[in-house]
Image (cartoon, grey):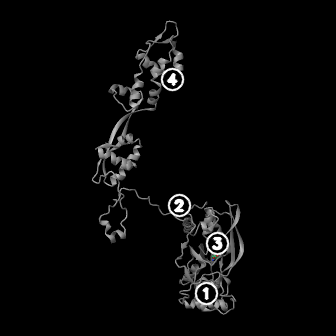
Amino acid sequence: MDISERILKYLSNSENVDTLKLASEFNEDHQKIVGAVKSIEALEMVISEAVKSTKWELTDEGHSVASAGSHEAVLYRGIPEEGILQAEVMKKVPNAKVGFSKAMSLGWIFIDKSGGAPIVKRKVSSIQDIVQENLNEIKKGIDNLAENVRNDYKKRKLLQEITLKSFILRKGPQFATTIKKLETDLTSEMILSGSWKTLQFKPYNFDALGQPPECGNLHPLLKVRSEFREIFLEMGFEEMPTNQYIESSFWNFDALFQPQQHPARDAHDTFFISSPASTTQFPMDYLERVKKVHSEGGFGSQGYRYEWKIEEAQKNLLRTHTTAVSARMLYQLAQQNTFTPRKYFSIDKVFRNETLDATHLAEFQQVEGVVAARGLGLADLISLLDAFFRRLGFHRLQFKPAYNPYTEPSMEIFAYHEGLGKWIEIGNSGVFRPEMLLPMGLPEDVSVIAWGLSLERPTMIKYGLNNIRDLVGPKVDLQMVQNNPICRLDK
Ligand code: PHE
């Protein structure tokens, strides 16, 4: 029989039962009884009323007195027939100080100073240890102590008063000695068969505590992104609108003086969109200039000398770099009547048809910075990169000549990572070519310097991850997301 049913059986023969009494009768833990009461109370089988009672209980010292005897009795027993030097008995007996004064006032012992050094002797031939007897009674649950005696024991720290919380039980409206299993769900079958009319349902427990709500947590990429954004904003850069994942080949490649036969424009490298497969909305005079610079040259360049096709430029794709956004921004900038120098940045997603591995995904985030001003050169780019990466915590940079269709010169950026103790490649950069800027209509003396890097790489380094799948995708450990601290790049 489980505890709930035992309680019900007990209650069928008696009214107003205290759960404390049940605990001692059943020899069960009181908390267990209370738990069972709560469940049958929810079924309205019992009604409970919380009560408080107080009880006197032995302290730890009280327990040791109950078993070994009071301090005065222990001292008395420590005195041999012929007596003992006071100094000696005080050393030999535990709690001798208390025991001595109590035994003296009870008249059990006396001091004989006739021989010089004080000797303690028994004054009576036998004693009754009332303290020990009383404490043992209380231990058994019998409490007939007179008030003054109780106070004395309390003062001696042998007894303490404790408060007990319990419940007085009565039969409830649904009282029975067996528990019927109640329905917890209303099912469609019950409704169809009409059985719901006779079935008994378990009442809702509106006092039950809900699951603590888990709060949202920023993903490490978002934490690092906000740190990058902060750095750009501190350096006076304005953010470009990057809310357009689908781009035309024109803005992604052609505007950037990337020839139409370039291998990056292959379906092996780029995700093309099948529907809608193409775009026809372009600033046509600008498109004509782009066509010309590719096929015939111009602005001092001989161009690529091939037949530029608008169909190729019209193809829609998932942008392969945020430089497509930079191209749009620079084109807009070129439409101003008077040129004003600008500093732009963006941090957003790009897509490449990559073979996936531990460090490559088909979509990732790019961080890009662009500065347009009169007379900028490679030296400005190097000093800007130095200032930018210094804020990220990289104090030593190295550059390696590189190639991009849209920049000349171009540089790969390497930084010495103090934590990893090695040089790591962290970005790409360059000075945009006149073949890109002049068809847009930017003044001839305006140059644009720019650089780009991925957001994932610094994030993986920062958070010590070596597989990109631990950072992005279905295998991301949410606990990792939750536990990782905010990003503070060590400046
Ligand atoms: N677009 C380049 C890339 O995707 C990065 C870059 C940006 C290079 C600007 C030079 C200038 O890697």
Residue type for callout 3: His
Label 4 and label 3: CA atoms lie apart by: 77 Å
- Label 2 element class: helix
First in sequence: mark 2 or mark 1? 1
Q: Which mark is residue 439?
A: 1
Are the two marked residues, 1 and 4, in contact with CB atoms closer than 8 angstroms? no
Circle 4: element type: loop
| Residue, disc 3 | 360
4 and 3 marks in contact (CB < 8 Å) = no
**Labels 3 & 2 near each other (Cβ < 8 A):** no
Mark pair 4, 2: CA separation: 57 Å
Checking the image for residue 94, the label placed there is: 4
The amino acid beneath tag 1 is Pro
Pointer 4 residue Cβ closer than 8 Å to ligand 1: no
Q: Which residue is mark 2?
A: 482
Amino acid, disc 2: Gln
Q: Residue at x 38, y 56 (%)?
A: 208
Residue 169 in view of the camera: no
Q: Nearer the viewer, mark 1 or mark 4?
A: 4
Q: Position of residue 411 (x, y in %)?
A: 69, 74
Q: Earlier in the sequence, mark 4 or mark 2?
A: 4
Q: Residue furthest right?
A: 401
Mark 4 or mark 2, whichever is nearer to me: 4
In the image, the residue with mark 3 has its CB under 8 Å from the nearest atom of ligand 1? no
Q: Return the residue nearer the eye: 157 or 445.
A: 157
Determine crowd level at label 1: few under 14, some 14-19, many 20+ residues with C-alpha closer than 10 A: many
